[in-house]
Amino acid sequence: MGEMSMSMAVLALVSVISVSVPSAPVAAQIRLVNGKSRCSGRVEVYLSNQWGTVCDDGWDMSDAEVVCRELGCGCAINAPWSAFYGAGTGYILMDDVACSLTEQSLTQCSYNSNPDCKHEEDVGVACTATGPSISLISSYSTVSAGETVQIRCSRSASRCNGNLLLYRNGVNVNSKALNSSQSSATFTLSNVDSSHQGSYTCAYSSSSTHSRSINITVVVGLLQKPSIFLETSKEVSWGRFAQMRCSISTQHLGGTFTLQQLSGSFTETKISTGTSALFTIPQVDFIHEGDYYCRYQTRVSRREFTSPQSATVSFSVIVVLVQPNISLSAPDGGLFWGPQGPEVTRGHSLSLICSSEPQHQGGSFHLIFDGSNRTRTQLAINHSASFYIPEADYSHQGNYSCVYEVTVSSRTFNSTQTAPLTVIVRASLAPIIASGVISGLFLLLLIPAILYLVKKKHLGSANTYRFHNGPGESRDEGENIYIYGDLEEDMNVEELHGPTVIDNDYDEDD
């Protein structure tokens, strides 16, 4: 009796020692029966060419987790005892199961292969049926190199414990631990390149079940930096047009170019023609001057891609005024053209006229006189202005020039100064003419008088009377000559009678 008790004790010890040693992996199968899906029900294993149930002694969530992992049913959410899914039939093949969560199969856990149980103690498992969920936080799954992509892994049930793992193309690339209050983990892929491209899934560290997959496509070198250049000059006249062209080297045609002013409000978008687009500002103003850049946008895989910003080009807006003209007129006819230019008679009026081509409305003209510090200014009327001098004097003699001034969009501009117009003031001819007239009249009066005197003298020498005072007196001494009569009468007498000489000698006695 004692020897039999000893033998039974030894057998019991051997039996206990045998269950403490994990069994070697064998080709086993497992299934869940009588549940609502393939991921819930009574646990049945296939050992030694037969199916059997598992006794609930020591059964817990760790054991159920290994079952769910082996079946690819996510994580365990329940580990019911006492034939929760109904009592099985046949053999009870496992008892006192103890898994450490490192096992890939239930049969790799330690267990008692000689159970002493009834089918009323059959165990069951309820699994989530799926692994964690995966979602893309970023807007697009097709990204350009250098961008950032964020992926979220969420556990499907609060009882799914362990880390959340991120896989790319089946290889674990990252993991994050979750505490009991967390339901998801966010994985950030920064500055992506071609190595980040692939198929991503999430999984629990305690389960081999992966989430559905999402694909990340990294487009490397999709859009290069476009080019921009001026089609017109860097200095554009106010009111004229300016043109800029944007171009890019890409195989993704049919996109749009956007021209943007760097420090202003101007922006315009145009559909590309081939690989470029021409932008025109029809009438530039000062608000348009400055720096410009362009970008290219196109759609690839249902996503809009934008190129980097191009370099900048700039242009300035200028106002170029045509040099005005200057001319001279004399309303009362005192203008003459001499060898040195226009000559104005002193005392006569003159007008200096400044004019310009019709570039801008309004403005004013400045008349500059070299001989004075003063500048006269008049508003432009019909693109000209007249400066009137009522009486020209020697002080008005000198060089005159014009400058045109106009205000455009609150900015004032001046033309270049005209070439000088030299004005000569000469003496008036009226006194000279008057003196000449008087002299002529005097000569006209003087000539007849002279002729008369000459004629008279001639006649006087022919008609003379000689008187003698007495005898013996010399003729010369007492000769008295008298000229008498009218010249015309004397001439008649001469003509009729010829010259008459009368000598009267008076005696002293008489």
Image: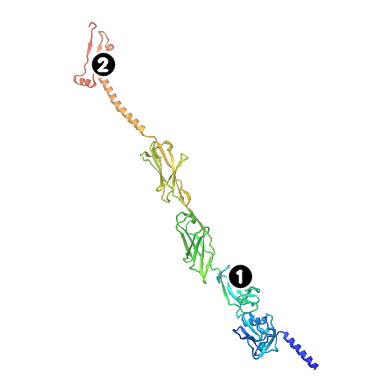
Residue at the far left in the pictured view? 496
Q: Which mark is residue 482?
A: 2
Label 2, label 1: how far apart the Cα atoms are: 154 Å
Quadrant in the rendering for residue 212: bottom right
From what the image shows, is residue 358 above or below residue 310? above
Quadrant in the rendering for residue 84: bottom right
* 373 displayed left or right of 208: left
Residue at (60%, 77%) from the top-left corner?
Answer: 211
The picture places residue 136, in percent across and down from the top left corner, at 57, 72
Quadrant in the rendering for residue 396: top left
Q: Quadrant of the N terminus?
A: bottom right
* Mark 1: secondary structure: strand
Name the amino acid type tagged 1.
Thr
The picture places residue 39, in percent across and down from the top left corner, at 61, 83
Q: Which mark is residue 188?
A: 1
* Mark 2: secondary structure: loop
The picture places residue 72, in percent across and down from the top left corner, at 62, 81
